[in-house]
Image (cartoon, grey):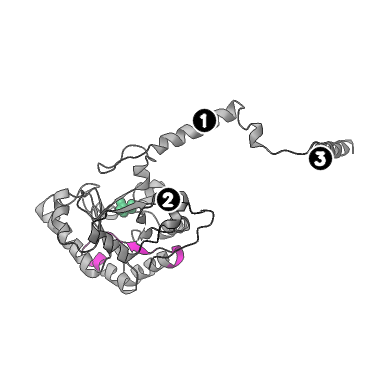
Amino acid sequence: MSTTHFVPGAAPDSADALRVPMTLPRLLEKKRLREPIVMVTAYDHPSALAAERAGVDMVLVGDSGAMTVLGYDSTVPVELDELLVLARAVRRGLRTPFLVADLTFGSYEISDQQAIATAMRFVKEAGCDAVKLEGGGPTPVARARAIIGAGIPVMGHVGLTPQTSTALGGYKAQGRTGEAAARIARDALDLQTAGCFSIVFEAMPAAVTEELMKRMEIPVIGIGAGAATDGQVLVFHDLLGIREGHGARFVKRYASLLDEMVAGVAAYAHDVRDGSFPGPEHGYAIEPEELVALRAQLAGRDAG
Ligand code: KIV
């Protein structure tokens, strides 16, 4: 199902050329061999290129893009058409990672038909390999089964599910009582039985994850769920520090790009204001005789 796409303007480096596109069988093989699966979110062409060049296994066009790049204060308001624009930009920058997109809140819950139609748009219009939907219980499980039945791979997502965080009591860790953890276990196993190719465990105790992993046959990707999962996912802007504040407890920051971006723009503003930019090296030349010709033409106009 993974597709290879020509990437305009993105000449592959030599490492890119050696990598082969990730597929569902290769993901399962990684689980079997206990090779950690690396997933990261991306929302545009540059973040996709970074993921490609870094050699990650999977890329998620997360609805977290609602906050990281579109400025909403949660994932709830983002529209399907907005996420499709981001997904298309990501697709143009990717060649080898397996590309998954989030179904936006309200774009799949109403009926199986709605869920299939939305999933198909991500595949047909944005070249995604699979879609992800949040939550367990009868509705998400039925929608997952319907989309899979239409031939599109589905990734589940349990634990903290941001689209429904209000109903979960806020943006906080889940599964911290035996009963709550058992609900997550039931949801995860139901999604596995429905045919999901993989599942995200978000913000839940590591010990709960360890219990569940004994029963999971599909690759499990964790975020704030401990080290026992088959792989990890982080939000691009969190791990690179392109955001205010530190974010959730489970975020590890590998760079402080927002600080660097501010410093770069401030240095540019300073150079414009003190006249040191642009310099001669940033401009274009004209032959002296062409300049003479220009002056003659302008003088003629002034006189006439
Ligand atoms: O939207 C997102 O970024 C996600 C990940 C946190 C798994 O769903």
Determine which residue is flagged by label 3. Answer: 290
Front: mark 3 or 2: 2
Image x and y of residue 145, in percent: 27, 70
Identify the element where label 1 is drawn: helix
Query: Magenta stretch?
Result: 124-141
Determine which residue is flagged by label 2. Answer: 53
Specify whether tag 1 is near ligand 1 (CB below 8 Å). no
Dot 1 amino acid type: Ala
Front: mark 3 or 1: 3
Q: Quadrant of the N terminus?
A: bottom left
Around disc 3, counting alpha carbons within 10 Å, would you say few (fewer than 14), some (14 to 19), or many (20 or more)? few
Question: Which label's residue is closer to the chain start, 1 or 2?
Answer: 2
Could you tell me which residue is drawn at 89 percent across and 36 percent down? 303
* For residue 111, above or below residue 134: below
Dot 3 amino acid type: Glu
Identify the element where label 3 is drawn: helix
Image x and y of residue 124, in percent: 44, 68
**Real-space Cα separation, disc 3 to disc 2, in angstroms:** 45 Å
Specify whether tag 3 is near ligand 1 (CB below 8 Å). no
